[in-house]
Image (cartoon, rainbow, N blue to C red):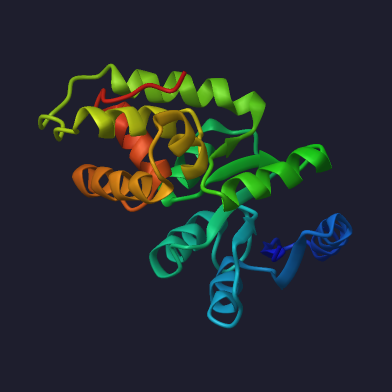
């Protein structure tokens, strides 16, 4: 099995080095690069093959939010997992809207971080437990507001897939629950993204909640 290729973007060298050693001890990760700024992270992705970018928020030159937007626009196959010290709902919403697949705090247990990296690489979404309830409250509040214009029409199957996406399931898990192939799941998700006018599954869930099409349980 090929190791997951990880890029570390953080302006603290000691933190990067410690995280690199931690990942390499696991055996199924390969650190393909380190960046001290968001701009460097984007530049590195033009030179290396990468599955997951671990992204700090506050970095010089270009912060993690701006870098995430660029990465998802230029390298949509790369999953972005934000690793930050900020226990802040606004930052969380901002980076998820930018396309990040996860948001964890730097004091997270190493075992949880490793599982989170594997989860986002597989198409899942991960949010720090302390922030998850705040995210649910905010998104469901947005979903209760008046909708204008009328929401796009999703088929019953697409609505089911969107609900499963909102539960944080990756494509393989959705396929198992819905009794369809992963290829069919991908086709449904492509249609959902097009109808909601978004570029990734995290944004689809956010937009779906806003438009009252689904809820995060």
Side of 200 relative to 123 (left or right): left
Q: Is residue 43 above or below residue 182?
A: below
Rendered location of residue 56, percent (x, y): 65, 54
Number of callouts: 0
Rendered location of residue 155, percent (x, y): 19, 32
Side of 119 relative to 204 (left or right): right
> Which residue is more in the foreground, 158 or 34?
158
Rendered location of residue 152, percent (x, y): 15, 35
Furthest-left residue in this view: 149
Q: Is residue 5 above or below residue 80?
A: below
Tell me where residue 34 sits by quadrant: bottom right
Q: Residue at x 58, y 66 (%)?
A: 38
> Which residue is more in the foreground, 28 or 74?
28
Is residue 83 shown to the viewer in this render? no
Q: Residue at x 12, y 29 (%)?
A: 148
Side of 76 relative to 158 (left or right): right
Q: Is residue 142 above or below residue 183?
A: above
Q: Residue at x 45, y 68 (%)?
A: 75
Rendered location of residue 74, percent (x, y): 41, 70
**Quadrant housing the N terminus:** bottom right
> Which residue is more in the foreground, 164 or 140?
164
Is residue 22 shown to the viewer in this render? yes
Side of 67 relative to 49 (left or right): left
Tell me where residue 192 sits by quadrant: top left
> Which residue is more in the foreground, 183 or 209?
183
Tell me where residue 2 sits by quadrant: bottom right
């Amino acid at each position: 099995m090929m190791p997951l290729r990880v890029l570390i973007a953080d302006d603290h060298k000691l933190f990067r080095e410690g995280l690199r050693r931690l990942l390499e001890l696991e055996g199924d990760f390969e650190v393909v690069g380190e960046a001290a700024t968001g701009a460097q992270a984007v530049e590195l992705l033009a030179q290396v093959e990468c599955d997951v970018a671990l992204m700090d928020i506050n970095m010089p030159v270009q912060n993690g939010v701006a870098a995430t937007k660029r990465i998802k626009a230029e390298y949509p196959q790369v999953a972005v997992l934000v690793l930050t010290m900020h226990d802040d709902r606004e930052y969380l919403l901002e980076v998820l809207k930018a396309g990040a697949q996860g948001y964890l705090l730097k004091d997270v247990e190493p075992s949880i971080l490793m599982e989170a990296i594997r989860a986002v690489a597989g198409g899942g979404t991960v949010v720090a437990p302390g922030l998850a309830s705040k995210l649910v409250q905010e998104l469901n509040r947005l979903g209760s507001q008046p909708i204008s214009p009328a929401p796009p029409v999703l088929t019953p199957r697409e609505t089911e897939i969107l609900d499963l996406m909102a539960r944080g399931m990756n494509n393989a898990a959705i396929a198992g629950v819905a009794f369809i192939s992963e290829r069919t799941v991908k086709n449904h998700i492509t249609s959902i993204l097009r109808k909601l006018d978004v570029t990734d599954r995290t944004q689809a869930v956010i937009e779906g909640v806003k438009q009252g099409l689904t809820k995060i349980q």
